[in-house]
Every structure is written in structure tokens, then in C-alpha cells.
Image: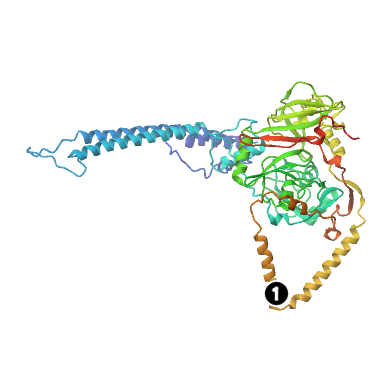
Amino acid sequence: MCVFTILAKKTFLVQQWRRLIYPKITGSLPKTFSLKGYPCCLRRNIPSNSCRTNSISCSFIRRMSTIMDNAVAGEEMAAASSNVDSDILKSKNDVDMLEKAPENDTNGDNPVETSPTSPTDDSSLKNVSNINKVCEEEATETNNHAKNVEITAKKTYVPAPGAMSKRALKKWKRQQSKGIKSTGPLTTNPDPGYGSDVLSETEYYYEDGLRKVYPYYHEFSSYVKGRWVRRTVFDVFKKEFHVPSDESLLNDLKTGSLRVNNKIVAPDYKLRFNDFMSHKIHRHENPVVGTKLEIIKDDEHVVVINKPSSIPCHPCGRYRYNSIVFILGKEYGYSNLRNIYRLDRLTSGVLICAKTSEKTRELEDQILNKLVRKEYVCRVFGKFPDDEIEVDQPLECINHKISLWQIRESGKPSKTLFKRLSYNGTSSVVQCIPFTGRTHQLRVHLQYLGHPILNDPLYFNEAWGPESAKGKIFKCKIDDKKIGDAVMKNHNIGLWVKGPNPRFQSRLQQVKEEEAAREAASASNNSVSESHEGETNSAKDEDESCEVKEPPSKRFKANDADTEKESRPDYDPQKWIPDENCIHCQTEYIDPRPKDLIMYLHALSYKGPDWEYRTSLPDWAQPDWQENL
């Protein structure tokens, strides 16, 4: 930076102090002034360190503005207090003057002229007492209001560092930006869930005990995250997402399937703040277990289920229709549900979904305020110690692509209590009581104790060394890439390549012929009569009316007869519509085995202030259970 620039900035700061800051504090400037014309970060209310212009002046003015606001707030409070006292004194003086007013001397030489406001009889004296009473009531009410304002200001909720999860902190910041003040972390959930229009994009089928989904087109969209800024779009997609190959990613950028701000960009385009990315793909989902969902509780407020392992709670990665909210909506009729909390994909157990926004806020607030007791059970490697063990090691994510976590000194605070329930000679069943809700908290804490979950694909892995990182606190990020790559190599994503798909070319040719036949049929039908068009339109209207009549509210649990009649269709090759450029359509995969879809971690119970939901112990948690090799 040149000397002239430094001098110019110093001159600017001195001018701001002389013209605004000092007069503001001394009272020679109006207490409110416009920020128009001042540094952009102050006007746009963004952090000064994120502003590329006037960074020094931005931070200086922001600090001075905070000082001024505090000073003005003190002056306004003092002024409000003095105004209240002056109003009370004025009211009492008026009453005293009325009480001391001379009576009308009709026998005197100089009678007092009466006025409509002058008390001249007994009723006037009553009016004086009434006025005095009203003044005292107003003064009391004003003082109480001032005290309430002061108490509310003191009780305004400010989260302590590490007291909230990232999700809860984002909600709190959104409330503050809207000017909502509260005494606690009141939550909001504007997401209305998924309706019948979204749930009709594709269908399920069942094969070899697995629930599968026919491929369909879907567009992913997201604004640029902070860690993506100044990185190329090619680098972000390659390292943060699962892409088949570099060639397919380059082809998506070339054809416009992958866009930034709805425009085709080059692979070396560097992402910026507020960039909007969209990626349209032919989506293939991973299979999940085909067992039916066990519904524990169903009323007008919530639906509680015993979540099977291998099914994620909400859409993520290569799971969308094969997620709990989509399965409940499409097969059981529970549309527009809200997830209160999240269980890992491989974790089974109690899962609560709310049906109304009011119940969602109530339950989320109870969880955020530590009013819910959570109990888990798991089967771990080796003999767990007899005594209760408490682990309070912080956690930090080292690989966002597969959500891999480590214990690091710079991580988020977390705390778990462990107690052994049984031991069968090779493995132990352990009760877990988490006091915080970090991602993979139980799994990483058990790994730290040297007793990882018996079939955990991430943390009971050779990549962590012979002792699986027992008692290890990572202090640097040198080994992040090495561990991440090693875990990814052995990580079970539910799909393994078998070879080229022999049905791809024949089915693709069949689809093209069907499309050509439909186009020819539509061209010949252009001469259809208006009456026939009217009949067709009326039939469409009837169909649409049937769709509209579908109840938007969530239905209650189906009875046994409905459950028995539930259809579980087999694979229909006519419903598979391949895409010519889709690499997954051209590849045949091996289905995962049942043991690849289950992890020995189960949410046994969730207990709130006036409610509790519990499941029975899974088979692998029984004391005499033995693993079949």
C-alpha cells in the first residue's frame, strides 16, 4: 500500500471522528443519522473483514458506532426516567393547585370568577380525588413498563460459545436479523416438507428384500458455501460431491447440466459469494432394506416410528425417495412432515416427526434447551469397562464428502456417558447417554475409548491404525487426506460395480421407438374435433380435482387390513427410462448384503418433560447374541 493511500485513510478516519463520533457523544449531533454514503459493509450490515473496500474505515466506524449506540441507549434510558419523574411531578402539582383553589365568596367585593374547570362544589372535590388517583395509577403503570423493558433487555438471550449447534445458531441469527428478541432460543421451521406433487416423480419396487427406486431426473441447487469461495467449480464438485468421473463432470459443464447463476461456465470458473449453482442429473438411488416401518405413535401432532437401519431421515447424497420422509409420504400418506432431529443413516431406533409447525417449534426448543433425555444402545468391540465412563472430547469434521469426524482440540464441545449392559465373551452391549448432539458423537467417542462399534464402516477401519485411534487427540490436519482416502477406499456406499449393463442398449432403442411413435400419434391427432377436446379437458379436470381433494393434513396410522393390502410391486422393465449420457444406466451393480446395511447402534428411547417414546431392544443387543460370520 502506497504512502498516499495510508495518509488518505488516516485523514478519512480523523474526519469521521471530528464530524460524527465526537459530536455524537457530546450531544451536538442528532441522535439518529443516515448511514447512506458510508462504507458498504456498514450500510449492508456485513462483517467488515468480508468487505473488499475501505476495510480499515469499515472496522473503525463499526466499533465507534457500537460505542455511540451504547452511549445513546444510556442517554435515552436516563431521559425516559426523567420524563416519567417530570410527568408524575407535573400531575401532582396540578392536583395540588386544584385542591388549594379558593372557594367562590359570593358575599365579598371581589368574587372569584368560576370556570368550567374550577372546583366549586362537593362533586368537584370528588373529581380532584379521582384525578389524583388516575395520576398515581398512570405513574405506577409507567414505572412498571420501564422496569419490564429494562428486565426484558437484561434477559435477552445471547448464546454462549459452543452452547448451540450450527443449525440452532443459524436459526438464532436469522431471528436476530429480523429484529425478533426472545428470552430463549425459539426456533422456526419454514420448510413445509414434501407434498403430493413431489412424491409422484417416481415409484418404488422390491427386489431381493431391498427397496429400490426407478431412476428419474432431478436438479440439485444450492448457494455457494463459505468454504467454496475462490475455488473452481470443477474442484468443488470433484472434492465435495460423488461424481462418476472427471469426464462426466466436464461433460455436464459443457452441455449445461451443471450451471452457475443459470449460465454455462468454464471448469476453471472461481466461485464467489451469492453464486447459485444448479446440477440436473439422471438420479439413481442406493437400495435400502425393504422392511415395513413400525409406527410407535400417531396422533394429530406427531408420528413416531422405529426407523430401520440403512434409511436416512431426510434426502441426502444418493438417497431421496429412499428416505424416511419420502417413504412416509408416498407409501403411508404422511405428507409434509418435519424432522425434529436426525439419526445417522445406519442408526435405527426412535424417530419423531411433527405434523404442525407449532409442534415442531415446541419439540425443537425442548431439545435445544436440553429438556430431552436420549438413550442409545450399541454393541462394541471387546470388553467394555465395568464402571460408568464420561467422555467430553471435542469433535471436528475432517472430510465433508463422507462426513468423517475426529477428536480435535479445536472442535465443538461434546459429552457422552457410557455404561456396559452385557458382555458375551467377544463384544459388549453399551448404554449411551449423550448430553450434546454432535454428528457421529457416539461413534467417535467409542473409538476414542478403544471400543468402536463392532461393524462401524467408518470408525472401526484399518485406516485408523492397529488401535483404531484409541485415546488419540488429533492436533493437526496433516493426515486428513490420507485417512479420508483410506476410509473412502473401504467405505461401503451400498453399490459395487459388476460390469456393463447388458439391457442398456436394447432398452434405450425401445424408448426411442416409443417416443417416435408418440410424436407421430400426436401429429395425427391435431385434427381432433373441439367436442373431443372438451371431453378430454373435462376428464383432465376430473383427474386434477381428484388430486386436489387429497387431504393436505397428515393421516392417521393405517389399520391392519390396510397394511396387509399394501402393494409391494416387483421390478417392471417398462418403467425404466434410461438416459443416453448416464453412466449409471450403462453400468450394472451388485446389490448390498443385509449385513452391509445394518450398524449396531440403536436409539432406544427419547423422553421429554411430559412424553416418552421407547422401542424394544434389537436382536443384536440381547445378552446371549452371537455374530454369524
Residue that lies at the very extreme toward the front in this rendered image = 561
Query: Is the residue 481 above or below the residue 193 in the image?
Result: above
The secondary structure type at the circle numbered 1 is helix
The way the protein has been coloured in the rendering is rainbow
Residue 388, image x and y in percent? Answer: 74, 22
Query: Is the residue 187 above or below the residue 26 in the image?
Result: below
- Figure quadrant of residue 460: top right
| Quarter of the rendering occupied by the C terminus | top right
From the viewer's perspective, tell me whether residue 190 is left or right of residue 325: left
Residue that lies at the very extreme toward the top in this rendered image = 387
In this rendered view, identify the residue nearer to me: 347 or 518.
347
Which residue position holds label 1? Answer: 533
Disc 1: CA contacts within 10 A as few (<14), some (14-19) or many (>=20)? few
From the viewer's perspective, tell me whether residue 394 is left or right of residue 628: left
Viewer can see residue 551: yes
- Figure quadrant of residue 619: top right
User: How many discs mark residues in the rendered view?
Assistant: 1
From the viewer's perspective, tell me whether residue 94 is left or right of residue 205: left
In this rendered view, identify the residue nearer to me: 472 or 609.
609
| Quarter of the rendering occupied by the N terminus | top right
Residue 40, image x and y in percent? Answer: 58, 43
Residue 502, image x and y in percent? Answer: 93, 56
In this rendered view, identify the residue nearer to me: 243 or 115.
115
Residue 305, image x and y in percent? Answer: 72, 43
Viewer can see residue 278: no
The amino acid beneath tag 1 is Glu
